[in-house]
């Protein structure tokens, strides 16, 4: 394969398996065999890759204090203030955690691992008002992002964040709560139509006693567990939660369900059933090895077909991270990353519901597209931005300062905020070959094939910097 053909394939691979690639790295990797390039994406971190923003010891002490306060019926004024202060600190830490992960994606040397963490973050969608729980779940997804799906599924199922979110803390013998059992099958493994209501009931009984204690650690409470006989998918026994997970993984429908979601996230919103079947068979036969699934996909000829290139709308996270990585952007006021996510409709750690973000066409509407097209010039040249559009009701407090500004007690002006970001233009321009033409720059920055309109718009542009800003402000830059 010629370096020119490889150039486009590697660019496509890194746009889907990561958040883009520098021109220098693209040029170097284009000279390698594509299989070797794919293998390079799976390189393991040399040291722990966890986010450690939230101190577990301090958080557990805070949890114990909070549990004590909530257990009391009548609180003194001082205790009420203590409870309010704990909530305020948790909200602040939750925002810090969000920014820490965005910055990690921007700066990571392991883009596939972070992209897979983003995928699992949407697949195992979960909200937690406890930042320690949220960080723990995020690290579980990162650690197992390319490992065993069974291990990932088990650890997610035992995480305090998920046990709390799907009410398994209330699931006990004689009073089963079916919420977690239902979502485990409907959204996490099998998909609708592949289980019965009776399977849900028996599964819920099996997960009784799966809880977390006052300091936020998983604990199995035998006294709350239903040790009676259950019948699940035609099998009968004294099942516990892990038995249920094993039985679910024995069904090929699980491999197909996961493979379809992976395909839609990394390949195309419109599923090709033959390609999905190929992935599912390989995934099932590999005993749910996620790396095997991803390598199979990234080395398949159909992954690089024209109908799969430049046809997916970037999620807000992919868009913001990709733009920031591409131009080596630093944010002097990191709060803007929260505001941008809220306005674009993907506030990380705060999915709309347990089904996660729908993705695809839902990322774009008239207001969000206009905002997306303005962001590159504002981030790359700095400026003001009007934050409006898709704000999560629960996040109003987070973005309140940018929504309202007052001249005096009776007069309001439009909410504006300085982006206060800085692109490292010398570094970006230094990665480009000398004498690169605007059209060549467009071929690098945009995934869809160039049309005459784009070529005409940039043909007489002055300077690579202004050309870059113009290209990233086009609708085509929203596609990967």
Image (cartoon, rainbow, N blue to C red):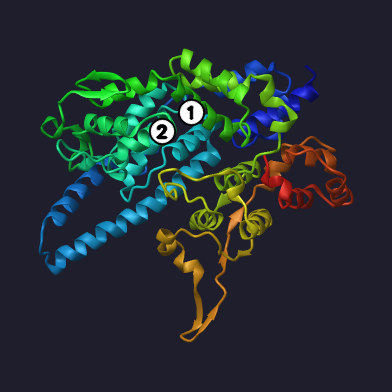
- Along the viewing direction, whichever of 474 and 191 lies nearer the viewer: 191
Q: Residue at x 69, y 16 (%)?
A: 33
Residue 142, percent from left and from top: 43, 32
Counting from the top left corner in percent of width and height, residue 4 is at 80, 25
Where is residue 325? Give x, y as percent. Answer: 61, 41
**Compared with residue 224, is residue 346 higher up or lower down, i.e. above or below?**
below
Left or right relative to 371: residue 55: left
Tag 2 residue: 188
> Gap in Å between the C-alphas at discs 1 and 2?
9 Å
Q: What crowding class fits label 1: few (fewer than 14 Cα within 10 Å), some (14-19), or many (20 or more)?
A: many
Seen in the picture, residue 164 relative to 114 is either above or below; the reply is below
Of the pair 120 and 181, the residue shown nearer to us: 181
In the rendered image, the vertical position of residue 84 relative to residue 407, given as above or below: above
Quadrant housing residue 144? top left
> In the picture provided, is 453 more to the left or to the right than 90?
right
**Residue beneath the point at 23% across and 29% down:** 206
Which type of secondary structure does the marked residue at label 2 adopt?
Answer: helix
Rendered-image quadrant of the N terminus: top right
Q: Is residue 269 above or below residue 154?
A: below
> Which of 293 and 99 lies nearest the eye of the viewer?
293
Q: What label sits on residue 178 in the rendered view?
A: none
Q: Is residue 48 visible?
A: no
Q: Residue at x 13, y 35 (%)?
A: 224
**217 displayed left or right of 298:** left
| Closer to the camera in the image, 114 or 254 | 254
Residue 287 spot, x, y in % from top left = 43, 15
- Identify the disc placed on residue 257: 1
Q: Earlier in the sequence, mark 1 or mark 2?
A: 2
């Amino acid at each position: 394969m010629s370096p020119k053909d490889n150039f486009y394939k590697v660019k496509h691979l890194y746009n889907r398996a990561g958040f883009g690639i520098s021109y220098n790295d693209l040029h170097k990797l284009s000279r390698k065999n594509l299989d070797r390039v794919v293998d390079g994406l799976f390189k393991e971190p040399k040291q722990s890759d966890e986010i450690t923003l939230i101190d577990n010891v301090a958080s557990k002490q805070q949890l114990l204090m909070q549990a004590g306060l909530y257990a009391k019926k009548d609180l003194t004024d001082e205790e009420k203030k203590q409870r309010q202060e704990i909530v305020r600190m948790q909200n602040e830490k939750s925002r810090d955690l969000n920014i820490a992960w965005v910055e990690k994606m921007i700066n990571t040397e392991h883009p596939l691992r972070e992209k897979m963490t983003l995928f699992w973050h949407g697949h195992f969608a979960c909200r937690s008002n406890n930042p320690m729980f949220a960080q723990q779940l995020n690290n579980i997804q990162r650690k197992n992002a390319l490992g065993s799906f069974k291990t990932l599924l088990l650890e997610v199922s035992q995480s305090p964040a998920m046990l709390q979110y799907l009410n398994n803390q209330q699931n006990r013998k004689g009073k089963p709560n079916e919420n977690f059992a239902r979502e485990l099958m409907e959204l996490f493994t099998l998909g609708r139509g592949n289980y019965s209501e009776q399977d849900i009931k028996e599964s819920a009984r099996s997960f009784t006693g799966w809880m977390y204690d006052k300091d936020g650690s998983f604990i199995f409470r035998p006294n709350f567990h239903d040790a009676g006989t259950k019948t699940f998918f035609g099998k009968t026994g004294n099942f516990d939660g892990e038995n249920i997970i094993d039985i679910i993984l024995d069904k090929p429908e699980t491999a197909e369900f996961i493979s379809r979601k992976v395909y839609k996230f990394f390949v195309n919103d419109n599923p090709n059933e033959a390609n999905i079947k190929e992935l599912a068979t390989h995934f099932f036969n590999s005993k749910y090895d996620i790396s095997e699934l991803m390598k199979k996909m990234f080395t398949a000829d159909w992954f690089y077909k024209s109908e799969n290139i430049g046809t997916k709308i970037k999620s807000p996270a992919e868009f913001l991270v990709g733009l920031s990585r591409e131009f080596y952007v630093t944010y002097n006021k990191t709060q803007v990353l929260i505001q941008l996510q809220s306005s674009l409709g993907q506030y990380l750690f705060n999915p709309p519901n347990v089904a996660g973000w729908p993705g695809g066409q839902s990322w774009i509407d008239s207001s969000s597209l206009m905002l997306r097209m303005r962001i590159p010039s504002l981030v790359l040249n700095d400026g003001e931005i009007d934050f409006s559009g898709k704000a999560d009701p629960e996040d109003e407090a987070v973005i309140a300062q940018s929504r309202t500004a007052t001249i005096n007690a009776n007069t309001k002006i439009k909410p504006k905020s300085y982006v206060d970001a800085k692109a490292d233009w010398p570094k970006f321009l230094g990665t480009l070959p000398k004498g690169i033409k605007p059209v060549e720059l467009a071929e690098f920055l945009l995934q869809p094939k160039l049309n005459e309109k784009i070529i005409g718009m940039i043909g007489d542009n002055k300077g690579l910097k202004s050309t870059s800003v113009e290209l990233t402000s086009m609708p085509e830059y929203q596609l990967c």
